[in-house]
Image: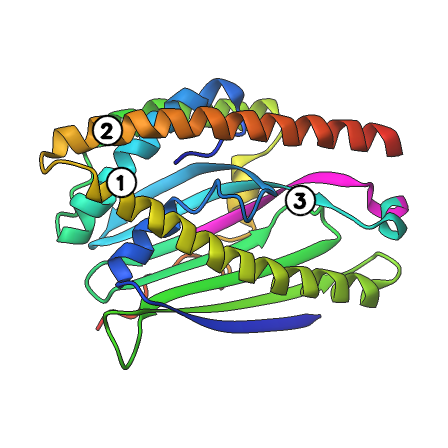
Amino acid sequence: MKIWTSEHTFNHPWETVATAAWRKYPNPHNPAVIGTDVIERRVVDGVLHTHRLVSSIWYFPRWAQALIGSAKVCYASEQSVVNPVSRHMVLKTINLTFCRHIAVDETLRYTPHPTDPSKTLLTQEAVVTVQGVPLTNYMEEMLTSRISNNAGKGRQAMEWVINRINDEVKGLTKSTDEIFNHTKKSLDDIASSAKKSMDDISQKAKKESRRYT
Amino acid sequence: MNMNSIGEACNDLKKEYDACFNLWFSEHFLKGNTNDSMCAPLFRVYQQCVKKAMKDQKLDVEEVSKDVLGTDKEKKEPQSS
Protein backbone atom coordinates (compact mmCIF):
# COMPACT_ATOMS: atom_id res chain seq x y z
CA MET A 1 0.00 0.00 0.00
CA LYS A 2 1.27 3.43 -0.97
CA ILE A 3 -0.15 6.81 -0.09
CA TRP A 4 0.49 9.86 -2.17
CA THR A 5 -0.58 13.45 -1.45
CA SER A 6 -0.13 16.83 -3.06
CA GLU A 7 -1.35 20.43 -2.94
CA HIS A 8 -1.79 22.98 -5.65
CA THR A 9 -3.10 26.56 -5.76
CA PHE A 10 -5.10 27.77 -8.72
CA ASN A 11 -5.07 31.54 -9.29
CA HIS A 12 -8.79 31.45 -9.97
CA PRO A 13 -11.81 31.79 -7.68
CA TRP A 14 -13.43 28.60 -6.43
CA GLU A 15 -16.53 29.06 -8.63
CA THR A 16 -14.37 29.08 -11.78
CA VAL A 17 -12.43 26.01 -10.71
CA ALA A 18 -15.55 24.08 -9.68
CA THR A 19 -17.18 24.86 -13.04
CA ALA A 20 -14.05 23.73 -14.86
CA ALA A 21 -13.84 20.54 -12.80
CA TRP A 22 -17.06 19.26 -14.39
CA ARG A 23 -15.65 19.98 -17.80
CA LYS A 24 -12.16 18.62 -17.16
CA TYR A 25 -12.49 15.81 -19.71
CA PRO A 26 -11.72 15.55 -22.54
CA ASN A 27 -8.46 17.46 -22.49
CA PRO A 28 -5.15 16.89 -24.28
CA HIS A 29 -3.33 16.17 -21.00
CA ASN A 30 -5.32 13.11 -19.90
CA PRO A 31 -6.04 11.17 -23.11
CA ALA A 32 -6.54 8.00 -21.02
CA VAL A 33 -9.98 9.11 -19.89
CA ILE A 34 -12.32 8.09 -22.68
CA GLY A 35 -15.74 8.51 -21.10
CA THR A 36 -17.75 9.86 -18.20
CA ASP A 37 -21.35 9.09 -17.35
CA VAL A 38 -23.56 10.44 -14.60
CA ILE A 39 -25.27 7.54 -12.86
CA GLU A 40 -26.98 9.48 -10.13
CA ARG A 41 -27.31 13.15 -9.32
CA ARG A 42 -29.43 15.08 -6.86
CA VAL A 43 -29.50 18.19 -4.71
CA VAL A 44 -29.97 17.46 -1.02
CA ASP A 45 -30.20 20.40 1.40
CA GLY A 46 -28.55 22.70 -1.11
CA VAL A 47 -25.64 20.31 -1.71
CA LEU A 48 -25.12 18.69 -5.11
CA HIS A 49 -24.40 14.96 -4.93
CA THR A 50 -23.14 13.22 -8.06
CA HIS A 51 -22.12 9.67 -8.86
CA ARG A 52 -20.21 9.25 -12.11
CA LEU A 53 -18.74 6.32 -13.94
CA VAL A 54 -15.38 7.20 -15.47
CA SER A 55 -13.89 4.99 -18.19
CA SER A 56 -10.21 5.12 -19.01
CA ILE A 57 -7.65 3.16 -21.00
CA TRP A 58 -4.51 2.05 -19.18
CA TYR A 59 -1.37 0.96 -20.95
CA PHE A 60 1.31 -1.10 -19.26
CA PRO A 61 5.03 -1.58 -19.81
CA ARG A 62 6.09 -4.73 -21.58
CA TRP A 63 7.09 -6.64 -18.44
CA ALA A 64 3.63 -6.23 -16.91
CA GLN A 65 1.74 -7.16 -20.03
CA ALA A 66 2.02 -10.89 -19.48
CA LEU A 67 0.18 -10.38 -16.20
CA ILE A 68 -2.52 -7.93 -17.13
CA GLY A 69 -2.40 -7.39 -20.88
CA SER A 70 -1.16 -4.35 -22.79
CA ALA A 71 -4.21 -2.12 -22.60
CA LYS A 72 -7.35 -2.32 -20.56
CA VAL A 73 -10.45 -0.23 -20.27
CA CYS A 74 -11.03 0.27 -16.59
CA TYR A 75 -13.99 1.76 -14.86
CA ALA A 76 -13.91 3.99 -11.82
CA SER A 77 -16.69 5.20 -9.57
CA GLU A 78 -16.51 8.89 -8.70
CA GLN A 79 -18.67 10.26 -5.90
CA SER A 80 -18.73 13.98 -5.40
CA VAL A 81 -20.34 16.71 -3.33
CA VAL A 82 -20.47 20.41 -4.10
CA ASN A 83 -21.51 22.83 -1.39
CA PRO A 84 -21.93 26.29 -2.94
CA VAL A 85 -22.36 28.00 0.45
CA SER A 86 -19.22 26.72 2.18
CA ARG A 87 -17.53 26.60 -1.28
CA HIS A 88 -16.36 23.01 -1.08
CA MET A 89 -16.06 20.49 -3.87
CA VAL A 90 -14.87 17.00 -2.95
CA LEU A 91 -14.48 14.14 -5.43
CA LYS A 92 -13.68 10.57 -4.36
CA THR A 93 -12.76 8.04 -6.97
CA ILE A 94 -12.27 4.31 -6.60
CA ASN A 95 -11.29 1.87 -9.32
CA LEU A 96 -13.94 -0.70 -9.93
CA THR A 97 -12.52 -3.10 -12.38
CA PHE A 98 -8.74 -2.84 -12.56
CA CYS A 99 -9.44 -4.88 -12.62
CA ARG A 100 -9.93 -6.35 -9.16
CA HIS A 101 -6.17 -6.66 -8.53
CA ILE A 102 -5.35 -3.02 -8.19
CA ALA A 103 -7.20 -0.48 -6.12
CA VAL A 104 -6.51 3.19 -6.64
CA ASP A 105 -8.56 5.37 -4.31
CA GLU A 106 -8.22 9.05 -4.99
CA THR A 107 -9.67 12.12 -3.27
CA LEU A 108 -9.64 15.62 -4.75
CA ARG A 109 -10.68 18.60 -2.64
CA TYR A 110 -11.24 22.06 -4.09
CA THR A 111 -11.61 24.75 -1.41
CA PRO A 112 -11.03 28.50 -1.26
CA HIS A 113 -7.42 29.22 -0.37
CA PRO A 114 -7.28 29.81 3.42
CA THR A 115 -5.28 33.03 3.15
CA ASP A 116 -6.58 34.31 -0.20
CA PRO A 117 -10.22 33.43 -0.93
CA SER A 118 -9.85 34.67 -4.53
CA LYS A 119 -7.66 31.61 -5.13
CA THR A 120 -8.48 27.92 -4.93
CA LEU A 121 -6.59 25.23 -3.10
CA LEU A 122 -6.57 21.69 -4.48
CA THR A 123 -5.53 18.90 -2.15
CA GLN A 124 -5.14 15.50 -3.66
CA GLU A 125 -4.64 12.15 -2.01
CA ALA A 126 -4.27 8.72 -3.52
CA VAL A 127 -4.00 5.30 -1.92
CA VAL A 128 -2.70 2.45 -4.06
CA THR A 129 -3.07 -1.19 -3.07
CA VAL A 130 -2.12 -4.24 -5.07
CA GLN A 131 -3.08 -7.75 -4.11
CA GLY A 132 -2.87 -11.17 -5.64
CA VAL A 133 -0.39 -10.17 -8.33
CA PRO A 134 3.32 -11.00 -8.21
CA LEU A 135 5.82 -8.11 -8.16
CA THR A 136 3.43 -6.06 -6.09
CA ASN A 137 6.10 -3.58 -5.05
CA TYR A 138 7.05 -2.85 -8.62
CA MET A 139 3.41 -2.44 -9.50
CA GLU A 140 2.81 -0.03 -6.65
CA GLU A 141 5.88 2.00 -7.55
CA MET A 142 4.78 2.12 -11.14
CA LEU A 143 1.25 3.22 -10.31
CA THR A 144 2.36 5.74 -7.71
CA SER A 145 4.74 7.41 -10.14
CA ARG A 146 1.99 7.38 -12.72
CA ILE A 147 -0.44 9.07 -10.33
CA SER A 148 2.17 11.69 -9.54
CA ASN A 149 2.71 12.28 -13.24
CA ASN A 150 -1.02 12.32 -13.95
CA ALA A 151 -1.66 14.76 -11.11
CA GLY A 152 0.60 17.28 -12.83
CA LYS A 153 -1.24 16.67 -16.07
CA GLY A 154 -4.57 17.03 -14.26
CA ARG A 155 -3.59 20.49 -13.03
CA GLN A 156 -2.44 21.52 -16.50
CA ALA A 157 -5.72 20.15 -17.79
CA MET A 158 -7.72 22.27 -15.34
CA GLU A 159 -5.86 25.43 -16.41
CA TRP A 160 -6.54 24.49 -20.02
CA VAL A 161 -10.25 24.06 -19.34
CA ILE A 162 -10.45 27.29 -17.31
CA ASN A 163 -8.86 29.20 -20.20
CA ARG A 164 -11.39 27.75 -22.58
CA ILE A 165 -14.27 28.72 -20.33
CA ASN A 166 -12.91 32.26 -19.87
CA ASP A 167 -12.55 32.60 -23.65
CA GLU A 168 -16.05 31.31 -24.18
CA VAL A 169 -17.53 33.71 -21.65
CA LYS A 170 -15.64 36.71 -23.07
CA GLY A 171 -16.96 36.12 -26.55
CA LEU A 172 -20.56 35.74 -25.49
CA THR A 173 -23.47 38.10 -25.10
CA LYS A 174 -25.39 38.59 -21.89
CA SER A 175 -28.55 36.68 -22.66
CA THR A 176 -28.67 33.24 -21.12
CA ASP A 177 -30.41 31.84 -24.18
CA GLU A 178 -27.68 33.06 -26.42
CA ILE A 179 -25.03 31.69 -24.10
CA PHE A 180 -26.79 28.37 -24.22
CA ASN A 181 -26.95 28.34 -28.01
CA HIS A 182 -23.37 29.48 -28.47
CA THR A 183 -22.12 27.00 -25.91
CA LYS A 184 -24.08 24.25 -27.56
CA LYS A 185 -22.67 25.11 -30.94
CA SER A 186 -19.07 25.22 -29.79
CA LEU A 187 -19.66 22.06 -27.78
CA ASP A 188 -20.84 20.32 -30.93
CA ASP A 189 -17.67 21.31 -32.76
CA ILE A 190 -15.42 20.31 -29.89
CA ALA A 191 -17.34 17.12 -29.26
CA SER A 192 -17.06 15.94 -32.83
CA SER A 193 -13.31 16.54 -32.96
CA ALA A 194 -12.89 14.98 -29.53
CA LYS A 195 -14.91 11.98 -30.62
CA LYS A 196 -12.67 11.61 -33.64
CA SER A 197 -9.54 11.49 -31.50
CA MET A 198 -11.24 9.16 -29.00
CA ASP A 199 -12.10 6.83 -31.85
CA ASP A 200 -8.47 6.87 -32.95
CA ILE A 201 -7.38 6.00 -29.43
CA SER A 202 -9.77 3.10 -29.08
CA GLN A 203 -8.80 1.85 -32.55
CA LYS A 204 -5.16 1.88 -31.51
CA ALA A 205 -6.01 0.22 -28.23
CA LYS A 206 -7.87 -2.55 -30.02
CA LYS A 207 -4.95 -3.11 -32.36
CA GLU A 208 -2.50 -3.15 -29.46
CA SER A 209 -4.50 -5.59 -27.40
CA ARG A 210 -4.92 -7.88 -30.39
CA ARG A 211 -1.18 -7.92 -30.90
CA TYR A 212 -0.57 -9.17 -27.37
CA THR A 213 -3.41 -11.67 -27.02
CA MET B 1 -16.84 20.19 -23.81
CA ASN B 2 -18.07 16.64 -23.69
CA MET B 3 -16.83 13.11 -23.16
CA ASN B 4 -18.22 10.03 -24.73
CA SER B 5 -20.71 7.89 -22.92
CA ILE B 6 -20.07 4.21 -22.32
CA GLY B 7 -22.99 3.61 -24.63
CA GLU B 8 -22.37 5.01 -28.10
CA ALA B 9 -26.12 5.42 -28.53
CA CYS B 10 -26.18 7.75 -25.50
CA ASN B 11 -23.56 10.23 -26.78
CA ASP B 12 -26.02 12.77 -28.16
CA LEU B 13 -28.26 12.56 -25.08
CA LYS B 14 -25.22 12.97 -22.87
CA LYS B 15 -24.02 15.96 -24.87
CA GLU B 16 -27.37 17.72 -24.52
CA TYR B 17 -27.64 16.92 -20.83
CA ASP B 18 -24.04 18.00 -20.06
CA ALA B 19 -24.56 21.31 -21.87
CA CYS B 20 -27.68 21.93 -19.81
CA PHE B 21 -25.98 20.89 -16.58
CA ASN B 22 -22.93 23.10 -17.13
CA LEU B 23 -25.19 26.09 -17.67
CA TRP B 24 -27.36 25.21 -14.69
CA PHE B 25 -24.31 24.67 -12.45
CA SER B 26 -22.63 28.02 -13.12
CA GLU B 27 -25.68 30.21 -13.72
CA HIS B 28 -28.14 28.77 -11.19
CA PHE B 29 -26.62 26.42 -8.63
CA LEU B 30 -23.51 28.47 -7.81
CA LYS B 31 -25.69 31.58 -7.61
CA GLY B 32 -27.87 30.10 -4.92
CA ASN B 33 -30.74 28.61 -6.93
CA THR B 34 -30.58 24.93 -6.02
CA ASN B 35 -33.77 23.91 -7.84
CA ASP B 36 -32.57 21.26 -10.30
CA SER B 37 -35.71 20.84 -12.40
CA MET B 38 -34.19 22.74 -15.34
CA CYS B 39 -32.29 19.74 -16.75
CA ALA B 40 -34.45 17.00 -15.22
CA PRO B 41 -36.19 15.93 -18.47
CA LEU B 42 -32.85 15.67 -20.33
CA PHE B 43 -31.34 13.80 -17.38
CA ARG B 44 -34.16 11.28 -17.36
CA VAL B 45 -33.76 10.20 -21.00
CA TYR B 46 -29.98 10.17 -20.75
CA GLN B 47 -30.22 8.02 -17.59
CA GLN B 48 -32.43 5.46 -19.25
CA CYS B 49 -29.92 5.16 -22.09
CA VAL B 50 -26.89 4.82 -19.77
CA LYS B 51 -28.54 2.21 -17.52
CA LYS B 52 -29.34 0.15 -20.59
CA ALA B 53 -25.79 0.53 -21.95
CA MET B 54 -24.36 -0.57 -18.58
CA LYS B 55 -26.60 -3.60 -18.57
CA ASP B 56 -25.52 -4.49 -22.12
CA GLN B 57 -21.86 -4.22 -21.07
CA LYS B 58 -22.56 -6.23 -17.92
CA LEU B 59 -21.66 -3.31 -15.68
CA ASP B 60 -24.04 -3.64 -12.79
CA VAL B 61 -25.34 -0.35 -11.41
CA GLU B 62 -25.93 -1.99 -8.04
CA GLU B 63 -22.41 -3.39 -8.08
CA VAL B 64 -21.00 0.00 -8.92
CA SER B 65 -22.81 1.59 -6.00
CA LYS B 66 -22.22 -1.27 -3.59
CA ASP B 67 -18.49 -0.60 -3.45
CA VAL B 68 -19.20 2.83 -2.08
CA LEU B 69 -22.55 3.06 -0.37
CA GLY B 70 -22.59 1.93 3.21
CA THR B 71 -18.83 2.33 3.61
CA ASP B 72 -16.80 5.33 4.67
CA LYS B 73 -16.44 6.12 0.97
CA GLU B 74 -20.11 6.93 0.76
CA LYS B 75 -20.73 10.49 -0.34
CA LYS B 76 -21.33 12.74 2.60
CA GLU B 77 -22.16 16.35 2.93
CA PRO B 78 -19.02 18.36 3.59
CA GLN B 79 -18.89 20.18 6.89
CA SER B 80 -20.80 23.34 6.21
CA SER B 81 -19.60 26.48 7.85
Give the chain letter at badge 1: A
Q: Residue at x 19, y 48 (%)?
A: B29
| Residue identified by numbered label 3 | A97
* Image position of A97 (left or right of A187): right
x%, y% of residue B67?
56, 51
| Residue identified by numbered label 2 | A182
Q: Is residue B72 magenta?
A: no
- Residue at disc 2, secondary structure: helix
Give the chain letter at badge 2: A
The residue stretch that appears in magenta? A66-79
* Image position of B64 (left or right of A87): right
| Residue identified by numbered label 1 | A168
Regarding residue A23, the answer to whether it shows in the image is yes
Mark 3 belongs to which amino acid? Thr
x%, y% of residue B23?
23, 38
Do the residues at discs 3 and 1 belong to one chain? Answer: yes
Q: Quadrant of residue B18?
A: top left
